[in-house]
Amino acid sequence: MIDTKQKILDTAENLFGAKGYDATSLRHIITEAGVNLAAIHYHFGSKEELLDQLIVRRAGPVNEKRIALLDQIEAEAGAAPLPLEKVLEALLVPMSEAADRNPEFVRLMGRMHAEGMLPSVLNTHFQQVIARFVAAMRKALPELPEHELLWRIHFMTGAMAHTMCGPPDYTRVSAEPSPFRSRIARLIAFLSGGFRAPLPQQDHIEVSQ
Amino acid sequence: MIDTKQKILDTAENLFGAKGYDATSLRHIITEAGVNLAAIHYHFGSKEELLDQLIVRRAGPVNEKRIALLDQIEAEAGAAPLPLEKVLEALLVPMSEAADRNPEFVRLMGRMHAEGMLPSVLNTHFQQVIARFVAAMRKALPELPEHELLWRIHFMTGAMAHTMCGPPDYTRVSAEPSPFRSRIARLIAFLSGGFRAPLPQQDHIEVSQ
DNA sequence: GTCTATACTGAGATAGAC
DNA sequence: GTCTATCTCAGTATAGAC
């Protein structure tokens, strides 16, 4: 059957998102999906390959959307600095829309960002969008020193990953009407303030590459 | 020997920090530490208990320092709003100092924050410091709505965890003189801007508990 | 090409000898 | 307190049925 593969992907996506990659055994996946253990290795080769293909399946469209939005922003701005909030939206809104359709996938992506994405996936499928995003941020904040920009993007990545994993334990958020979308609005406001913050006064100087 | 236990703790700390908790086997730890496998279960009961005790050993002093700094800030401010940067420093500087002594421990803490801290550790050893910190942030930002404050603290947690795990891949930072300290200065500037950012305009309203 | 059955290696955990 | 032997379950590999 062709949908043996689909069933494995869907089931693994939900379990990885809910419990984490390491905590989910292949035997749990096959029980839930009603397939044989060896089917996973026939279709994917290994647990890691399964994760990889599972990420690529959904991250592909998300990243295409991101690039399309960045294209649009750059076209509209011409030579002017890009509007910061728009650039952040280009990164975050496509993931938010994915979360409405596949919440567990976004939880999984948050986990992967936080735990350290597989280098293969990162290099193959995110390199382009990262490069485009960093370039856009440079054009949105032309006065910010390069190494400070990179650090702030690093901070942003952490906040984003954590936000994708779920809401704070100590808040209960209503499910209406689009919880992820308003979460993103809050995050963009927070990040914009962070990126626009005055430089720290430092006792010591660091050298960036 | 009494230092069998110490040797296990030290070795596990370094390996967990360097490679992650799941990726580190007990057999790797005992090989490195030169002890027997059963010794771990004799002294700690389980791999998870080992992690727990390892965190408590170093997080205890860090959290005491944090509380002492918060006490001091509140005493100096009297009834006035607390200075935001000082409150953030109270949270981050003690961890930075720990990083100078035990860098792998701080990497491990970053991983644990990101992957989801063990509830037992969180409730037992961090609850007090979290409550004190949230209260201090409330006094530093009295005009910020409560649910917005909690979300922004959530964002902060993600940025902090990610920063503790390491520098961005795409930067090479010199080791002089206190890399973690200046990393923290950058982070505090970024977070301060985020916490002071104007509220997002929302299409839809969420309800916080 | 697709799937089943089964075996192999290494993980964490445990009982019991010393 | 410490160590050997062993248990169960994980991911992996493969031979062979359809």
Image: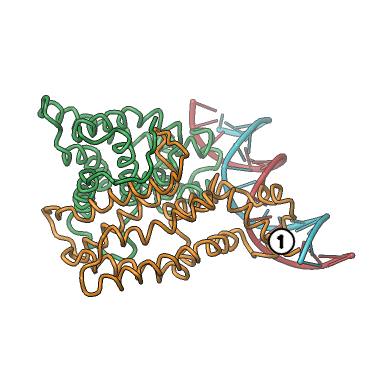
Chain colours: A green, B orange, C red, D cyan
Whether residue B151 is situated above or below residue B28 in the rendered picture? below
- Other-residue count near label 1 (Cα within 10 Å), few / some / many at <14 / 14–19 / ≥20: few
Q: Position of residue A121 (x, y in %)?
A: 42, 33
What residue would you read off at disc 1?
A: B3
Placement of B60 over or under A52, stated as above or below: below
Q: Quadrant of the N terminus of chain B?
A: bottom right
Please report the residue visible at 41 percent of the width from the left and 29 percent of the height from the top: A123
Displayed quadrant of residue B146:
bottom left
Q: Where is residue B171 in the image (x, y as percent from the top left)?
A: 39, 34
Query: How far across and down, in percent of the image, does residue B152 sit?
Result: 26, 57
Q: Residue at x 42, y 36 (%)?
A: B173
Residue B82 versus residue A139: which sits nearer the camera? B82
Give the side of residue A133 with respect to residue B48, left or right. Answer: left
> Which image quarter holds the C terminus of chain B?
bottom left
Q: What's the residue type where badge 1 is placed? A: Asp
In this view of the protein, which residue sits in the foreground, A26 or B164? B164
Vertical order, A54 against B79 (above or below):
above
Whether residue B20 sits left or right of residue A157 in the image: it is right
Residue B134 location (% of width, % of height): 30, 67
